[in-house]
Structures are given as structure tokens and as C-alpha cells.
Image (cartoon, rainbow, N blue to C red):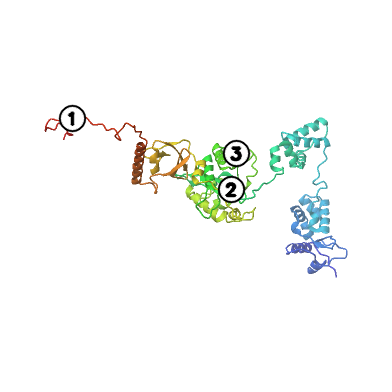
């Protein structure tokens, strides 16, 4: 005995199937028989669509909101047998449209209520070929025009020719259909060069073959000497081959040639820390065109050290991506743990450390994290890659020679009787006793003003210390040096004295005039 299912039963069966966990092939009469229903021969299941394998359950979850809205309009008819005429009057939908929806529902289920796509979807509307060619020509014209400007010109041209114009959307679609490389090569050579031109990526083949240097302002606040929050600048020297950091310099002042020289000095010379063996003289030094990198100071130092100084082309930052990637690593892995970290210019916490503490933490980050972590490009630890094969770097003759090249002051200083006056401080050293009144060159490290390096006529003399320094010379050592210098001067005068052959005595002795003597009366205190 076959039972003709009512609309209410059909809807309840659909809802039950929508709430099921999965959809797949089902027996033709399985769901209907659960509700006491049986599909008649030749009847199309309302929940199945035709398929090469037979009736396959469609997933109502993929139905659009439009199909669901149409189903809700038909729902009173399907569940409660409300006439379509009444639904058409209440919903403002034509009865013919409702009957078409109902037929689609019975044939293909909820997917039959989907809106049919346009036959010309993704196809451009018919446009006069001459106007389309005009749009393409204007889009590749220099200077480049905006889509709105092209649309106005095309509309004016269409009106002149007496043909149908193009809408703004059609103009935009034509312009977007032109390859961006064609537009760039015709309108903006720099954009084409930077985004579409094939480039050759050059990598160093060995450690110290090429170093890169650059500056960046860190997204963090530190306290200066007046306890005011300021953003520090970081200067980094990076080995191109291993990605190891050879030197760095942190300061609250803007980048300068001195900052670059100090970071390069640290990079070249041997480090005190045994966990940081990166050092040596590079073959090439690759930098940008900043005022500090093109300074005569850096150029002369590179010439003296036999380092090839290479500047990137202005406006073309290619090749510096490696050091920029390191700056991103600093922002992602180091700065979030520092108090005063900035996100979009706003501090997440109150700044609490000074520049010296930030320098200590950054150096610890290099040794414990960055140099010990596998690099994403090389697949090796930067420090291990730099040391591979027992690499031995070339070093300057001495630290004094390196200091003479990289550390300078604008003008010489005169050695006074109490030492050297420099930057509001006094520096003394027993060796300076022989240079009182002489002009000397004072070299210093802004990070450590407790000592300065004194050179005379290009030759290293001594290291002078500030008296407040713990290793400053004592008063006794200064007196001893003064006495020895005086004795040496006297001896040099004696050695240089010219004697005449007729001189019988080694030295001319002049007798002092004698005062008159008046018996035993003493007229002067010097009388005997």
C-alpha cells in the first residue's frame, strides 16, 4: 500500500536530513520508508538530484540565502497546503513565479531554488572596438591616467562619434585586464624595474667576503641621562654569507659617520666575549647612500684597510634585504620582551631601562638566540656557518692602528701641565709629561669616556684615563714621571753642550762680587 506524502511530512524529512552529520548516497526509499512513505514508480525524489551514479543527496548547507528565502515563501504551501494564490497576494510574488519555484523544488530540492547565473558572466559587454582600443591606449600612456579620467575621455569620444559609450565599470574591467607589467613598462619605469624586472641575486661565497651595514630606529623607548623616554638607533654590521652579526652600535642620537665607524671598529677587532668570534677585515663593504656612509671618514678607512666600498644605487634598495630581514627579526623576537615596546607608535608598557641595559640585553640576544638559531634561508646557525672549515680572518696590525683609522676628533688637543682637557673632563697619564705643550690627536669611544687614546704625529703615545677612573695614575706616579722628564731634559742639554778647545775648565765659573767687610760688624745677613 503506497502512501502519498503530505507537504508537512516532506518538510520534516528535509529538516531531519539537514541536521544529519553527513550526506552521501542513500537508498532511494530509505528515508521515505522511515516516515511510512513510499516513492511511487517514476516519481522524482524531492531531496535528490540526478547523477550518473543515481540519486545523490545534496547538501543543503551549501544553499545560498536567496534559495533559503524562496523556500520560506513556499514553506506554508508545502507544510500546511496554503494555496499559492494566497501566498502570491501576501508576499507580492507572481503566482506564475511561485509555480516555477515549486516545480524546481520538486525536481532538484533546495538547489533548484538557486538563481540561475547570467549567461554572460565574466564576459565583457559589447563595446565599440575603437572605444576599447582607446581605453587600452590611454591606460598605457604616460603620465598614467586614472580610470575616472579615461572614462570621461571615452564618453566624450563616444558622443563625438555617435556611438554608445562605456560605463565606468566597463572601463575599469578593461584597464584591469591589461597586464600590470605592460602598464608599468609604459608609465613607470621604476615600478617595472622593482616589481617585474628579472634580477640576479648575488650571495657571498665565503665568510667576510662581503659585509653589509645599515641603521634603523627601534620600536622601543629607553631612558636617557635625564630619565626622559627616547627611541634608540641601532647600527648593525652583518656578514652576507653567514648572516652573523659582526658588530653593532646603539645610541640615542641620529646616525652619523662616528656611529658607523664605532660599529665597524667593533666588527673588525677581536671581541672580548669568547662566544662571539666574528671579526676580521672584509673584502667588500656594502652600504646605502646615507650621508654617514658616503663620508670621507668611512672612505679613507676603507682605503687604508684595503676594503672595497660599494654603495647601492639611489632609490634601488635591492641587495639590502638580508639586513632588513635581521631588523624584522629584532622587532619580532627581541623587542617584545623589552619594557617600553612600541606597537604602531604606542608603548605597551612603561619604559624602565636605559641605553646601557638595552645594549647588554641585545648582546645577550645575539649570543644566546640569534647566533644559535638556524637561519630560514641558509638552514644553518649563523655562527656555525661563519666558522665552517676553520675560517681564519685577516686582522689589522694592532688595535691602535685600527683606532687611528676609525676614531677621530674634529681638532687636536694641547697637552697641558695637568693633562689633556677633553669634553669637559681631564685625562692624565705619566707618559704625557714628555708632551706638555705639544699638539696631540685624541681618539675616543663615545660609549666609554673613561679613557682616550692619544696619538702624536700619527704614532700611538698612550692611553690616558680620567682621574675618576679606578685605574687612573696616582699622584706619586705623576711626580715620578715629571722628575724623570726633567732629568732627561737636563741630560740632553749637557750632551748637546758645545765646548771650545781653549777652554781649560769644563765650565765657566763667574765669581760673585764681594761686599765690603767692616771688621766684626755684620751689615748684611749674608756676611760671615
- Residue 515 numbered mark, or none: 1
Vertical position of residue 333 compared to residue 17: above or below: above
Q: In x, y percent, where is residue 449? A: 44, 44
Q: Quadrant of residue 145?
A: top right
Query: How many angstroms separate mark 3 from mark 2 (CA)?
Result: 17 Å
Q: Quadrant of residue 82?
A: bottom right
Which residue is tagged 2?
238
Identity of the residue furthest to the bottom in this view? 1
Q: Residue at x 85, y 61 (%)?
A: 52
Which mark is first along the chain, 2 or 1?
2
Q: In x, y percent, where is residue 461? A: 44, 42
Q: What secondary structure is found at the residue carrying circle 2?
A: strand
Query: How many angstroms separate mark 1 from mark 2 (CA)?
Result: 85 Å
Identity of the residue furthest to the left in this view? 520
Image depth: mark 1 or mark 2 in front: 1
Instruction: Compare residues 87 and 464 and report the one nearer the observer.
Output: 464
Instruction: Compare residues 496 and 206 and report the one nearer the observer.
Output: 496
Which residue is tagged 3?
289
Amino acid at each position: 500500500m503506497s502512501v502519498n506524502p503530505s507537504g508537512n511530512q516532506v518538510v520534516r524529512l528535509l529538516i531531519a536530513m539537514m541536521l544529519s552529520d553527513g550526506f552521501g548516497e542513500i537508498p532511494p526509499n530509505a528515508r521515505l520508508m522511515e516516515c511510512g512513505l513510499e516513492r511511487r514508480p517514476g516519481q522524482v525524489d524531492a531531496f535528490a538530484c540526478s547523477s550518473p551514479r543515481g540519486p545523490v543527496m545534496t547538501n543543503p548547507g551549501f544553499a545560498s540565502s536567496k534559495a533559503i528565502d524562496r523556500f520560506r515563501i513556499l514553506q506554508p504551501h508545502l507544510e500546511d497546503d496554503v494555496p499559492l494564490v494566497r501566498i502570491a497576494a501576501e508576499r507580492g510574488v507572481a503566482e506564475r513565479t511561485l509555480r516555477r519555484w515549486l516545480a524546481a523544488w520538486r525536481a532538484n530540492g533546495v538547489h533548484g531554488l538557486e538563481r540561475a547565473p547570467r549567461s554572460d558572466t565574466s564576459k565583457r559587454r559589447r563595446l565599440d572596438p575603437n572605444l576599447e582600443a582607446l581605453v587600452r591606449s590611454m591606460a598605457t600612456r604616460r603620465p598614467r591616467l586614472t580610470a575616472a579620467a579615461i572614462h570621461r575621455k571615452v564618453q566624450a569620444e563616444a558622443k563625438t562619434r555617435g556611438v554608445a559609450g562605456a560605463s565606468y565599470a566597463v572601463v575599469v574591467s578593461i584597464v584591469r585586464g591589461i597586464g600590470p607589467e605592460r602598464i608599468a613598462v609604459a608609465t613607470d619605469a621604476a615600478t617595472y624595474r622593482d616589481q617585474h624586472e628579472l634580477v640576479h641575486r648575488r650571495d657571498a661565497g665565503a665568510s667576510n667576503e662581503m659585509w653589509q651595514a645599515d641603521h634603523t630606529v627601534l620600536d622601543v623607548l629607553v631612558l636617557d641621562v635625564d630619565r626622559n623616554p627616547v627611541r634608540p638607533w641601532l647600527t648593525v654590521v652583518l656578514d652576507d654569507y653567514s648572516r652573523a652579526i659582526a658588530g653593532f652600535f646603539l645610541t640615542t642620537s641620529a646616525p652619523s659617520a662616528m656611529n658607523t665607524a664605532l660599529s665597524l671598529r667593533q666588527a673588525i677587532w677581536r671581541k672580548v666575549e669568547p662566544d662571539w668570534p666574528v671579526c676580521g677585515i672584509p673584502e667588500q663593504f656594502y652600504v646605502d647612500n646615507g650621508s654617514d656612509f658616503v663620508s670621507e671618514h668611512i672612505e679613507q678607512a676603507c682605503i687604508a684597510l684595503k676594503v672595497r666600498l660599494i654603495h647601492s644605487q639611489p632609490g634601488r634598495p635591492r641587495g639590502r634585504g638580508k639586513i632588513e630581514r635581521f631588523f624584522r627579526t629584532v622587532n619580532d623576537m627581541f623587542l617584545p620582551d623589552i619594557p617600553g615596546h612600541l606597537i604602531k607608535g604606542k608603548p605597551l608598557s612603561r619604559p624602565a631601562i636605559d641605553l646601557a641595559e638595552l645594549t647588554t640585553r641585545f648582546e645577550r640576544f645575539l649570543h644566546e638566540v640569534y647566533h644559535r638559531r638556524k637561519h630560514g634561508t641558509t638552514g644553518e646557525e649563523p655562527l656555525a656557518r661563519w666558522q665552517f672549515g676553520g675560517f681564519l680572518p685577516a686582522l689589522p696590525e694592532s688595535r691602535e692602528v685600527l683606532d687611528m683609522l676609525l676614531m677621530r676628533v674634529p681638532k687636536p688637543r694641547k697637552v697641558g701641565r695637568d693633562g689633556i682637557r677633553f669634553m669637559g673632563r681631564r685625562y692624565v697619564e705619566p707618559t704625557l709629561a714628555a708632551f706638555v705643550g705639544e699638539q696631540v690627536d685624541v681618539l675616543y669611544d663615545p660609549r666609554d669616556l673613561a679613557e682616550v687614546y692619544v696619538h702624536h704625529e700619527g704614532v700611538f703615545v698612550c692611553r690616558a684615563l680620567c682621574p675618576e677612573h679606578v685605574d687612573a695614575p696616582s699622584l706619586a706616579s705623576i711626580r715620578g714621571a715629571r722628575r724623570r722628564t726633567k732629568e732627561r731634559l737636563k741630560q740632553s742639554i749637557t750632551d748637546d753642550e758645545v765646548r771650545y778647545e781653549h777652554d781649560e775648565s769644563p765650565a765657566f765659573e763667574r765669581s760673585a762680587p764681594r761686599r765690603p767687610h767692616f771688621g766684626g760688624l755684620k751689615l748684611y745677613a749674608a756676611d760671615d
